[in-house]
Image: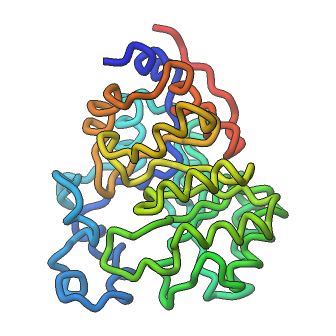
Amino acid sequence: MSNAFETARAGGVVDTAVGFPKSREDMFEFYEFIRKGSHDSATKEGELEFPAGYMFKNVPKWESDDMGDPVEMLFLEHQRHGITQAIVGVEDEIGQRAVRDLPDHFFASISIDPNEGMEAVRKIDRYANEFDLKAVGAFPSGLYPQVALNDKMFYPIYAKCIEVDVAFCSTAGVPGPRLQFAPQEVALIDEVCWFFPELTFVTRHGCEPWTALAVKLLLKWPNLHYSTTAFAPKYYPKDIIDFGNTRGADKVIFSGYFPAGLTYERIFNEMPEVPFRDHVWPKFLRENAQRVFKLPEKKVPTQ
């Protein structure tokens, strides 16, 4: 077990993409947007309750009768695992209540769909004015219709993120749900970073199978970063670990996949086996996220 990991974890962990626990019924309803763009019967007819569930073991599930207050459930889960700050969606009452009631723990993000045109741009303004917005997220393969990362429909979104000084986060690589991957090929990020050097761009969901290319782009573009969403630590790509241990210590950011596909128990049971060098752990677990997403430094009380 890595003593450096435990020491860094004691200083606090930031999770940059967290959802609130949902009942199985609510989870099914939430993923309707993916079923719209799917053609296979397992996804469209709901055999896959969680559209990428075939990729994960022991997907977290809650029955309606077991659900308490989602904000309290998530906050207690974070306390158990040493997570001191988290970025959550604020497009519903639950997320909005979380960032208002616990403003030193929960921070605001929204998802964006460039198919909405100027309304998508105005949406960023609205939430930036109402909340201390930290991230704008997109799922190019999950949009209906799909929109590629370098499509000019995204350009007003990128410009607005720069204007309001908010990070843009996108899934990149082959998606888990049975959707076409073309809109989020890693190579497309090169054009975005070239045209928008002031845009803070954070990849999500692995960048596979183009992790070697992702490393080249991370090294090339100062504004590009990588987060580990949707990957259990035992499956972190070797290219990314090696990069984090060398020239990319300031570029790789921890993020889990709770409650969609991974429990925090699994994440933190596997984490000590990740072969990061000692100096990388505090950067990976919190410092890079605090800098990239402009989160306040949070002092963790000593026991």
Residue 37 visible in the current orientation = yes
Q: Nearer the viewer, residue 262 or 184?
A: 184
Q: Which quadrant of the view contains residue 34?
A: bottom left
Counting every numbered tag in the picture gives: 0
- Residue 56, placed above or below residue 238: below
Residue 3 in the image, given as x and y percentages of width and height: 39, 13
Residue occupying the point 25% across, 62% down:
23
> Furthest residue to the right?
163
- Front-most of residues 188 and 42: 188
Residue 128 percent location from the top left of the image:
74, 61
Name the residue nearer the viewer: 103 or 279.
279
In the displayed structure, does residue 11 sit left or right of residue 223? left
Q: Residue at x 45, y 28 (%)?
A: 276
Residue at (69% x, 34% y) in the render: 296
The vertical placement of 296 against 169, above or below, is: above
Residue 213 appears at what percent x and percent y?
54, 59
In which quadrant of the rendered view does residue 50 lie? bottom left
Residue 98 visible to the viewer:
no
Q: Is residue 155 depicted above or below 209 in this figure?
A: below
Quadrant location of the N terminus in the rendered image: top left
In the image, taking residue 143 as reference, residue 153 lies left or right, namely right
